[in-house]
Amino acid sequence: MKKDKTKNLLIEQLKKTPIIQIACEKVQVARASFYRWKIEDKEFAKATEEALLEGEVFITEMSESQLISMIRNGNFQAVQLWLRHHNPKYGQRIEISGNINQPQEELNPEQEAVVREALRLASLLPEQKSEENN
């Protein structure tokens, strides 16, 4: 069946070039047909997803090979890219700073007494003589 042969060619093409539009053009299939086949044929849908993943791995490995060649040739941008993505020491750093402006509320006498007692107990305030000893 011609349709099955075309589907298989499309799957093989996706393994080499994991871009649906390009694979469809190379096999001379409309993208609409590709998506319709994915809906109608669950095996085809699964095979295309696997082919896309395999194709992405292939392209990644090919890219890394090219990058390593560029590093060997002394390409500074290639060296920088490799280090930025493979060594945390050279990765991008994000620094966040800021101020929080929050209106300060006055403590009521009860809250102030609790804070003073907590500070006294933590030995951060000198003990005050009680009013009885004055």
Image (cartoon, rainbow, N blue to C red):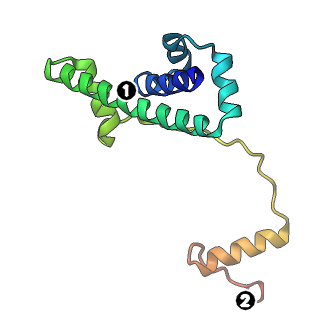
Disc 2: CA contacts within 10 A as few (<14), some (14-19) or many (>=20): few
Residue 17 position, x and y percent, is 43, 21
Q: Earlier in the sequence, mark 1 or mark 2?
A: 1
For the point 66% across and 79% down, the residue is: 128
Q: Position of residue 105 (x, y in %)?
A: 81, 54
Question: Is 2 rendered above or below residue 61?
Answer: above
- Rendered location of residue 19, percent (x, y): 51, 21
Residue at the spot of label 2: 133
112 sits left or right of 2 in the view: right
Taking depth in this image into account, of 57 and 102 the one nearest to the observer is: 57
- In-image side of 90 versus 72 (left or right): right
- As measured in the structure, the alpha-carbon distance from the residue carrying label 1 to the one carrying label 2 is 85 Å
Disc 2 marks a residue whose amino acid type is Asn
Identify which residue, 119 or 76, lies in the foreground. Answer: 76
Q: Position of residue 114 (x, y in %)?
A: 75, 75
Q: On the rendered structure, is 7 left or right of 16?
A: right
**Which tag is nearer the camera, tag 1 or tag 2?**
1
Q: Residues within 10 Å of mark 1 (few under 14, many from 20)?
A: some
In the image, 64 versus 48, the foreground residue is: 48
The residue at which mark 1 appears reads as 59
Circle 1 — which element?
A: helix
In the rendered view of the protein, which quadrant contains the N terminus? top right
Q: Secondary structure at mark 2?
A: helix
| Label 1 with label 2: CB-CB less than 8 Å | no
Question: Which image quadrant is residue 87 in?
Answer: top left
Looking at the image, the residue that sits furthest to the bottom is 132
Decide if residue 21 is on the left or right side of residue 89. Answer: right
Q: Residue furthest front?
A: 1
Q: Residue at x 80, y 70 (%)?
A: 111
User: Toward the viewer: 116 or 55?
Assistant: 55
> In the rendered image of this protein, does residue 108 appear above or below residue 47?
below
Amino acid type of the residue tagged 1 in the rendering: Ile
